[in-house]
Amino acid sequence: MDMKVGKKKLGLKEKYQHMTRGLGWETTYQSMDDVFPFVKYEGIKIHDWDKWEDPFRLTMDAYWKYQAEKERKLYAIIDAYAQNNGHLNVTDARYLNAIKLFLNGISPLEYMAHRGFAMTGRQFPGVGARVACLMQSLDEIRHAQTQIHSLSNYNKYYNGFHDYRHMLERVWYLSVPRSFFDDAVTAGPFEFMVAIGFSFEYVLTNLLFVPFVSGAAYNGDMGTMTFGFSAQSDEARHMTLGLEVIKFVLEQDPDNLPIVQQWIDKWTWRGYRVLTLVGMMMDYMLPKRIMSWKEAWEVYFEENGGALFKDLARYGIRPPKWLDQIEQDKDHISHQAWATFYNYAAACNFHTWIPTDDELDWLSQKYPNSFDKYYRPRLEHWREEAKKGNRFYNKTLPMLCQTCQIPMIFTEPGDPTQICYREVDYKDNKYHFCSDGCKEIFEHEPEKYIQAWLPVHQIYQGNCFEEGVDPTAEGFDPLSAVLDYYHLAQGRDNLDFEGSEDQKNFEAWRGMATKNAA
Amino acid sequence: MSKVFIALQTNDDTRQIIQAILADNPHAICNEQPAMVKIDAEGSLVVRRSTIEELIGRDFDLQELHINLISLTGNVDETDDELTLSWNA
């Protein structure tokens, strides 16, 4: 970029002061408590909002200038990618399933983040914090839009991209990311900031965007790489905001510490559970792999997160709870998740498969403590069965965790052969959990989590069929009725990658792209 | 001492920026990954406007970094002349 830098009238610090301080006032026609009704009930005490400072000191005028430049770059590349049939340059068609998961599971969260930051910004009396929330809210809607635009190109050619908006509120596994964000936006403004601004953006988002987007680049997906990097260029600001929030809140009043600590524990665990999907994408769905989930976890969580919590120790913050379990889990969760999606491939909008021998070897090498012992034999067994024509599709529905809504697939800390179950009796009902973390989060706010819309329960209650369908009719096929409700076509959008329409089309079109017609 | 990092896209705009960061931070280590670089440094890392300007031969506003920035860690402090990342512990 060749941007002309004019002579500055004000320095960065002075400009930031002018653009973020003089804009607010004490209201007199209405009381401040009526104008900002949600800012006190969580118990967080703020004495001086002017102590808030954005370390980047970004003001709206500069924001528009740089965001416009990012958009121009992005759309130039998206157009070129589409015009050049760039989708045929991805490593192989299995890769497409990773971006189906992205569009359906992650892009809608960007939109929810947009709403969340708009609401939160409205609730903060401090102008500096409101400006930062406004920018992030605009960033997030930009991310949702650019992701939808970029991925709509794939929808012209491949299955499973066709109705993400409808599926988000229905398809079983999508209740995991959706309920995570619903939980955050229905919290108070400070909890939302700790949940999304700090725990998700600062502690966890690198794991999603950095290795995955770099992986997209590695797999020839220029479209995803471009929107991914364009979104990331905003993430650095979001992370900085997230850290600023924590420091600001902790410096304002010593009473804030235990409240913030409890939120950090809760939201690190909640976010960590959602990232199971990302672990699976990295280890199984990128044909060319960039790093294993475990390696990414070690760099971006253990190393960076470790440095972060060491820095925050001066405020009395300790690292999030359940870290010893998280530490053990990194050898397991991506394999446990892939096995689950392999099982339930009949009810998904993307395909699954058994990795090739090379890929199995890569996993053995990356996971020397777990893969050969616990996971490889099962995958090889399923492969043998599939060869005999018995591709395994699980037709029973799994029990879900009341908090994270993930099927109960995780194992006991210390024993990877034993599924971890926890339960709580609350008001005449029994609730089930995948872990101590999810159980404790429930116990802290049971009235919130008993309202969870659990896809399996809803199917059994008959709420996941199209209107007019009679589950008591002769020959009623529940799976097929649920697929109709999801807007998924049996045999086209679901099942194994082997033999799928995507596989056949990609092969045929790639052939056409490299050869002349006979 | 904890490490801070800054990650940038690799393109024609960032080539000299990366060069400037490495020149100003001899203790930094540059990790090249597909389409990006991650520069790690013990303790702290500074991005200096004057060094970038010398390399690109024009005026540079440090906020232009946002266009090609991917991620960073550490406490951020930005002035007209420097962007500093650091941990206090």
Image: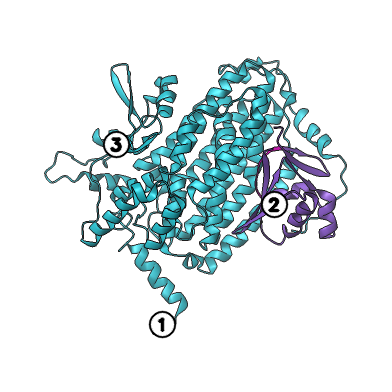
Q: Which quadrant would the N terminus of chain A be assigned to in this image?
A: bottom right
Furthest residue in direction bottom, as rendered? A518
Q: Residue at x 47, y 41 (%)?
A: A275
Q: Position of residue A102 (x, y in %)?
A: 47, 49
* Gap between marks 2 and 3 measured at Cα: 49 Å
- Chain B shown in which color? purple
Contact, mark 1 vs mark 2 (Cβ under 8 Å): no
Chain for disc number 3: A
Residue B73 magenta-highlighted: yes
Indicate which disc residue B29 carries: 2
Tag count in the figure?
3
The residue to which callout 3 is attached is A456
Chain for disc number 2: B
Chain part drawn in magenta: B67-75
Looking at the image, which is closer to me, A29 or A127? A127
Mark 2: secondary structure: strand
Q: Residue at x 53, y 64 (%)?
A: A82
User: For the residues carrying marks 2 and 3, which lies nearer the camera in this image?
Assistant: 2
User: For the residues carrying marks 3 and 1, which lies nearer the camera in this image?
Assistant: 3
Q: Position of residue A458 (x, y in %)?
A: 29, 34
The residue to which callout 1 is attached is A517
**Mark earlier in primary sequence (3, 1):** 3
Q: Which chain is cyan?
A: A
